[in-house]
Image (spheres, rainbow, N blue to C red):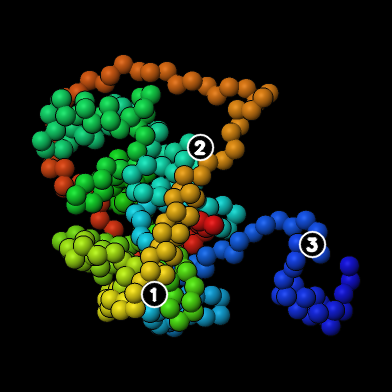
Amino acid sequence: MGLSEAEKAALREIQSEGTESQFTGRTKLERPKTPFYKLLNCSPKATDKERAAFKPGIRISEDCIAQSIRAVILYTSDGRKLAKKVGGKFATTCCSYDGESPAPKIAAPECNKLTSEGLVNILSKFKGYDKAKIEAKVAELTEDNALAFCSIKTANGFIPMCPKARWNEDAGTSGPCKPLVHLFGFDIERQTVFKMELAGRSIASDKRFTSPLALYRKWLGQKRVNCYAFTVELSPAKDGAFYHLNVENYTPIVDAEERARMKAMAHETYERFQRNASWTPSKQNEEGAGEAPQKTAAPAPKVTPKATGREDDYVETALGEDDLPDDVSFD
């Protein structure tokens, strides 16, 4: 239907007025997506001229970049993401929403490619892992002779088990599956819930560098308080050639009604995240589709411990630039 500019403007105005069910046709029900805020960073491949012209900030929208945001952090969750470039855009091929297990929506997780024998070889390098402990851990982490977990969660962090997440000793680089933190917050100025994906130094926590976000999460635990009861200042902080997220000025929300509103919002955000994290595609084994091939159990692998380091020596760090593509939506 060819419309004049005036008619197009009128149509947009009419659409903005909303609809009433008794006066309209069938429509696809869609809820607005949660805005995705991104900490801007210069590309590792940028030239000196591009680095000089780069302006840091937090991208709110295509036409809005903020230098700082006063916000309430509603919920954070550790995760992982493996992405590759397909047709000029990054696509997620494997991911985790808790940092430990692959997302149910992933049909063929990368961790499944590691056999029990391969897991034995990894665990045999840990000091304190005798034959009995290795066999018990292999039984815990595998299913049908295949690794079923991305990593092991410890008190000090995550130990990657999946080959795509582990350090590549031959190449001297970390695996392509990167750790991240899903952060959901409430932007006080714009009165909207937003989400961020943080990686690199923004989530690092070790003896060399501990990120402001990691310090805030630790502080919450030490004080035994909930994140939704405090406002914080979010801003970019430079460290070397790149920027990480700075979290500072923790301030208690004085008004009890406002704290209750943030609490309700935090619970709703958490429940939505969990629903999306547990989502699975429609079953393909419907009538006429045939049955999925059954895995065959393999004999228990031979265990020969050859410890080279303590378990804590293998806890993953997250140093580097925040360079994850922003292609994931949890709506």
At a point 57% along the width and 40% down the height, the residue shown is 281
Q: Is residue 308 left or right of residue 271?
A: left
Q: Where, quadrant-wise, is the C terminus in this rendering?
A: bottom right
Disc marking residue 63: none
Name, please, the residue furthest toward the left. Answer: 128
Tell me if mark 1 has few (under 14), some (14-19) or many (20+) residues whose alpha carbon lies within 10 angstroms of its own: few
- 206 or 189, which is in the foreground? 189
Above or below residue 225? Residue 129 is: above
Disc marking residue 258: 1
Q: Label 1 is placed on what type of residue?
A: Glu
Secondary element at image label 2: loop
Residue bearing mark 2: 107
Residue 310 percent across, percent down from the top left = 12, 43
Q: Is residue 27 left or right of residue 162?
A: right
- 170 or 272, which is in the foreground? 272
- Of tags 3 and 2, the one toward the viewer is 3
How many labels were placed on the picture?
Answer: 3
In this orientation, does residue 324 appear?
Answer: no
In this orientation, does residue 61 appear?
Answer: yes
Secondary element at image label 1: helix
Q: Label 2 is placed on what type of residue?
A: Ala
Residue 58 percent across, percent down from the top left = 43, 76
Distance, label 3 to label 1, CA atoms, is 36 Å
Identify the mark nearer the N-term, 2 or 1. Answer: 2
- Of tags 2 and 1, the one toward the viewer is 1
At a point 48% along the width and 77% down the height, the residue shown is 191
